[in-house]
Image: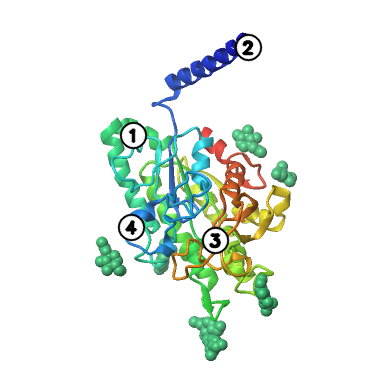
């Protein structure tokens, strides 16, 4: 008994020593912060604080039921990808930009807004578009300069990682949903992708001008496989591939764009996670990754629980909730469960070249 106690104390204190010495070497001088931009895959509660509708919010039960135990605004039963990435990067949980009080931005901050895209028109008036998110980042830079000094702030922003999930909602605007069927609007897809990539590029360049050098990207997933969209076609038995095809087009252009920026911008470094592949994998082979359901959601109604009614707050009161969200890739009709977010975050952080090009996010942090 005593021996065991002694061992425990010993190992605890050695952990403490390691943490203290790490703190002396790395913090606050050498840590890299994490700045998050984008849509609902990354939003951890910013939309709680803006004038919008419940369609763009997740601050009511059963969101948050598994972890946190309260509906924080995350579109999941628990954590979202940025929460887990922060953990893997040994950073504290990042606050949403609009968190009341004076949140500490030294380790980074999250600007993402559910429903937003690269284009101003996407859900205009209901979300914080990417351009405005970058404007808020400039404000954070000001705050940091006042807090830790000009030189230190410049160094910190240079070491930090800027991680973005952008595009799905822009392409969502191309869907023509009538009478519970779906088709694509007759627009020039290549040109539309060009607009999205063009506006995303401008945002990256603005962050670069502010001193950002390391950029992480989530490319656009197989949009047509989200339960809300698949149920509009063949009663959910297959994905709506026409919209996923636009996502594939976007992803090709995103790869080209990052290569181009690497040539144009001195010191520009990046990591693109192929979310299209990683999400397709778990949707197609759920049991291989420990999920029971890959096609349907945990919370919603109708076939595959694909109708966007989770929480009973969007005009329809009745909805179904599964027993164990961990069994599902999707928590609601659009967004991954805590368990799925954990799977994706680990692939983003430490996955190989198949999923991350030219390298994974842990490498981007180290560079
Ligand atoms: C919020 O939006 C509603 C409806 O669009 C509008 O009536 C209201 O004035 C807005 N409130 C604020 C604070 O902007
Ligand atoms: C939608 O369905 C209703 C009833 O089934 C029908 O009257 C209407 O013409 C349909 N509208 C379109 C645009 O197909
Ligand atoms: C949307 O689809 C409906 C039929 O499903 C069609 O009648 C309508 O013309 C389409 N709208 C546009 C703008 O293409
Ligand atoms: C940004 O998007 C708008 C459409 O919202 C488009 O007119 C404009 O050309 C795009 N900008 C770039 C640089 O592609
Ligand atoms: C669609 O699926 C639902 C339940 O999943 C089923 O009740 C319905 O009969 C199906 N409709 C068709 C046309 O297959
Ligand atoms: C991810 O990057 C790290 C750092 O470069 C590397 O050690 C690791 O092997 C990579 N993971 C995989 C699975 O390639
Ligand atoms: C990457 O890892 C996956 C399994 O996670 C494996 O199937 C694939 O062959 C690996 N690719 C490379 C390039 O090592």
Q: Which quadrant of the view contains residue 228?
A: bottom right
| Label 2 vs label 1, nearer the camera | 2
12 vs 352, nearest the viewer: 12
Please report whichever mark, 1 or 4, sits nearer to the chain's N-terminal start.
Answer: 4
C-alpha distance separating marks 1 and 4? 28 Å
Query: Could you say which is closer to the camera, residue 362 or residue 116?
Result: 116
Ligand 5: quadrant of the figure: bottom right
Residue underneath mark 4: 50
- What is the number of the mark on residue 1? 2
Left or right of 347: which side holds 262? left
Dot label at residue 153: 1
Q: Do the numbered discs 3 and 1 sit on residues whose CB atoms are within 8 Å?
A: no
Find the distance from the CA under tag 3 to the CA under tag 1.
37 Å
Q: Which residue is mark 3?
A: 334
In the displayed structure, does residue 353 sit left or right of residue 311? Answer: right
Alpha carbon separation for disc pair 3 and 4? 21 Å
Does mark 2 have its CB less than 8 Å from ligand 6?
no
Check the image and name the residue furthest to the front. 1
């Amino acid at each position: 008994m005593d021996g065991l106690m002694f061992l425990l104390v010993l190992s605890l204190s050695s952990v403490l020593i390691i943490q203290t010495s790490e703190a002396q070497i790395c913090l606050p001088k050498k840590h890299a912060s994490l700045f998050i931009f984008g849509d609902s895959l990354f939003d951890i509660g910013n939309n709680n604080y803006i004038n919008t509708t419940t369609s763009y919010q997740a601050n009511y039960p059963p969101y948050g039921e598994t972890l946190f135990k309260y509906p924080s605004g995350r579109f999941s039963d628990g954590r979202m990808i940025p929460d887990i990435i922060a953990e893997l990067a040994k950073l504290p949980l990042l606050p949403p930009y609009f968190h009341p009080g004076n949140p500490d931005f030294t380790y980074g901050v999250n600007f993402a807004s559910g429903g937003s895209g690269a284009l101003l028109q996407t859900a205009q008036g209901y979300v914080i578009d990417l351009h405005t998110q970058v404007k808020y980042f400039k404000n954070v830079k000001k705050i940091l300069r006042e807090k830790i000094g000009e030189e230190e702030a410049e160094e910190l922003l240079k070491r930090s990682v800027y991680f973005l999930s952008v595009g799905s909602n822009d392409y969502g605007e191309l869907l023509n949903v009538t009478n519970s069927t779906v088709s694509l609007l007759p627009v020039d897809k290549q040109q539309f992708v060009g607009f999205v990539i063009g506006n995303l590029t401008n945002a990256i360049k603005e962050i670069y001008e502010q001193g950002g050098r390391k950029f992480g990207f989530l490319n656009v997933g197989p949009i047509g496989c989200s339960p809300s969209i698949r149920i509009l076609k063949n009663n959910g038995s297959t994905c709506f591939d026409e919209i996923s095809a636009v996502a594939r087009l976007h992803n090709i252009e995103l790869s080209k764009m990052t290569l181009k920026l690497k040539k144009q911008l001195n010191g520009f470094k990046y990591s693109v996670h192929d979310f299209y592949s990683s999400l397709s994998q778990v949707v197609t082979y759920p049991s291989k990754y420990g999920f029971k359901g890959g096609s349907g959601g945990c919370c919603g109604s109708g076939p595959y629980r694909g109708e966007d009614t989770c929480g009973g707050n969007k005009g329809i009161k009745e909805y179904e909730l599964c027993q164990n969200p961990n069994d599902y890739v999707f928590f609601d009709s659009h967004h991954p469960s805590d368990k799925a977010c954990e799977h994706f975050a680990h692939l983003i952080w430490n996955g190989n070249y198949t999923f991350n090009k030219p390298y994974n996010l842990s490498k981007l942090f180290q560079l």
